[in-house]
Image (spheres, coloured by chain):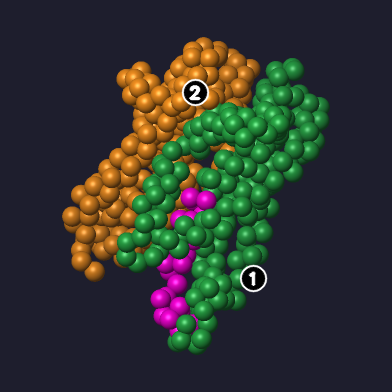
């Protein structure tokens, strides 16, 4: 099979140049989603009936039950025109359609990650023994302090493997950002491939690019987990 | 902005639903071929050949790092070229379903091999030894004693893999395969972009029902298979 090696190597540099976009699409949604996911996890862990439980659970089920490509299509077809209508209604002189589409990509991935991350946190907090919170409160900590200083470090240790999976899946999911005309790795490869129909070479480049990024992410998580392992309760008693 | 049309949301369902079969064909075909491939991978990982073990582990790792859409594109553009130049057969005019199922088989095999491997390891090796000691052949011991128990252990994770496969399967429309989403896209473009929200919402509801139904189905199968489980 003939492979155009010159194109393969040239395009690899073009793909590498788009790596920052992929990283931005991963890191910003993760950070933006964290506080919301944390809140949702706490709401869902609460005992007894709460007004918020039903809509929050419905949201999580909706996000987990539909393909992300559908979420992208929905938000990308709704949000720009909705924002445009709002801007007009409030007579702001802003043209929404001039905005960088990456803005919508951030929103889609954040909304998606909020739900998935809340599930990770929920199971992680659920695994921390209840006595820990009670003991912290007895020792005079407020509930917020107890959560931040006592429960969170323990929960994060448990959450690490799932968090790693979530991040790797998000990195892979950003490959769909080209549907919103964001110039990420997949999009730039597609564009350079279309000049000479060198699709295989271009996608092989993207393939390698994702393997490298995901490997780095997994190594980082490995170190983070080892570092956080300090907080793990020793099993011997 | 045009107000949301509830009427269109209702009307679009009968147009979309016939294409459910295409979506399910991808899922069923991939489960079939992917489970065979996953079984082989699991066998390689558990086997005593170091080379096979390494290869299977490397394959699983690489797939874990590959976005479905990239693999789909590589197969869709690469496989016909490969077949034409190496095997001298023209598969350019094959049905797109063929390429979709091949891509997702590659993708599905990796997580399923891990599910199978961990289920196999969850079964106490003494079960196998006891079976062999009472005169069963190694194959009989595997198929009659180990496999039924491992299946029960594997079911929840297998169900999760199938559900994520179904969601990833929605990407097939990007190579022009007409499944639920593909038809949805056609409807949207036939209306010049109007009614996009209604169409996508209808699709979302269909997928929601599918995933929840799948979850319930696997729960039911698991309960059915657990009849013979001994109380701990």
Q: Is residue B67 visible?
A: yes
Q: Position of residue A46 (x, y in %)?
A: 39, 65
Q: Main secondary structure of the magenta part?
A: helix
Q: Quadrant of residue B69?
A: top right
Secondary element type, mark 1: helix
Secondary element type, mark 2: loop
Residue located 45% across and 43% down the image? A63
The disc label shown at residue A13, or none: none
Most foreground residue, A188 or B44: A188
Most foreground residue, A180 or A8: A180
Chain B: its colour in the image is orange
Q: Please check the rendered image and state whether residue B135 is part of the magenta-colored stretch, yes or no.
A: no
Chain A: its colour in the image is green
Most foreground residue, A108 or A218: A108
Q: Which residue is mark 2?
A: B2
Q: Which residue is mark 1?
A: A227
Residue located 42% across and 31% down the image? B201
Q: Which residues are magenta?
A: A114-136
Q: Position of residue B212 (x, y in %)?
A: 33, 42
Q: Position of residue B157 (x, y in %)?
A: 39, 50
Residue located 40% across and 55% down the image? A52
| As drawn, A225 above or below A6 | below
Q: Nearer the viewer, mark 1 or mark 2?
A: 2
Q: Quadrant of the N terminus of chain A?
A: top right
């Amino acid at each position: 099979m003939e492979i155009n090696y010159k194109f393969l190597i040239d395009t690899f540099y073009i793909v590498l140049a788009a790596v920052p976009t992929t990283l931005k699409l991963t890191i910003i949604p993760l950070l933006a989603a964290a506080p919301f996911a944390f809140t949702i996890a706490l709401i869902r862990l609460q005992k007894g009936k709460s007004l918020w439980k039903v809509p929050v659970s419905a949201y999580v089920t909706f996000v987990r039950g539909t393909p992300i490509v559908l979420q992208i299509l929905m938000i990308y077809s709704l949000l720009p025109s909705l924002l445009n209508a709002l801007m007009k209604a409030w007579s702001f002189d802003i043209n929404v359609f001039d905005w960088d589409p990456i803005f919508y990509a951030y929103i889609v991935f954040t909304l998606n990650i909020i739900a998935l991350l809340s599930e990770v946190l929920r199971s992680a907090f659920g695994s921390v023994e209840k006595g820990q919170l009670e003991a912290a409160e007895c020792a005079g900590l407020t509930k917020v302090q107890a959560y931040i200083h006592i429960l969170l470090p323990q929960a994060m240790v448990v959450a690490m493997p799932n968090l790693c999976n979530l991040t790797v899946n998000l990195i892979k999911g950003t490959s769909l950002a080209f549907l919103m005309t964001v110039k990420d790795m997949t999009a730039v490869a597609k564009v350079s491939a279309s000049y000479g129909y060198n699709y295989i070479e271009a996608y092989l480049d993207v393939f390698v690019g994702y393997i490298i990024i995901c490997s780095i992410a997994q190594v980082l998580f490995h170190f983070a987990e080892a570092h956080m392992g300090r907080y793990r309760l020793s099993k011997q008693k | 902005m045009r107000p949301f049309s509830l009427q269109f949301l209702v009307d679009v369902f009968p147009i979309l639903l016939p294409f459910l079969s295409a979506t399910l064909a991808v899922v069923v075909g991939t489960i079939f071929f992917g489970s065979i491939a996953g079984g082989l991978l699991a066998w390689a990982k558990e086997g005593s050949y170091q080379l096979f073990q390494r290869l299977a582990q490397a394959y699983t790792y690489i797939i874990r790092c590959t976005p479905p859409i990239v693999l789909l594109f590589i197969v869709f553009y690469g496989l016909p070229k490969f077949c034409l130049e190496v095997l001298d057969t023209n598969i350019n005019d094959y049905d797109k379903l063929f390429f979709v199922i091949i891509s997702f088989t590659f993708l599905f095999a990796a997580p399923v091999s891990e599910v199978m491997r961990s289920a196999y390891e969850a079964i106490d090796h003494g079960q196998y030894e006891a079976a062999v000691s009472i005169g069963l052949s190694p194959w009989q011991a595997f198929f009659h004693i180990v496999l039924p128990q491992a299946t029960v252990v594997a079911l929840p994770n297998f169900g999760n893999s199938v559900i994520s496969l179904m969601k990833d399967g929605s990407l097939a429309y990007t190579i022009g395969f007409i499944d639920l989403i593909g038809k949805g896209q056609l409807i949207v473009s036939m209306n010049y972009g109007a009614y996009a929200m209604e169409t996508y919402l209808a699709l979302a509801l269909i997928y929601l029902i599918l995933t929840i139904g799948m979850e319930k189905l696997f729960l039911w199968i698991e309960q059915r298979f657990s009849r013979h489980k001994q109380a701990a």
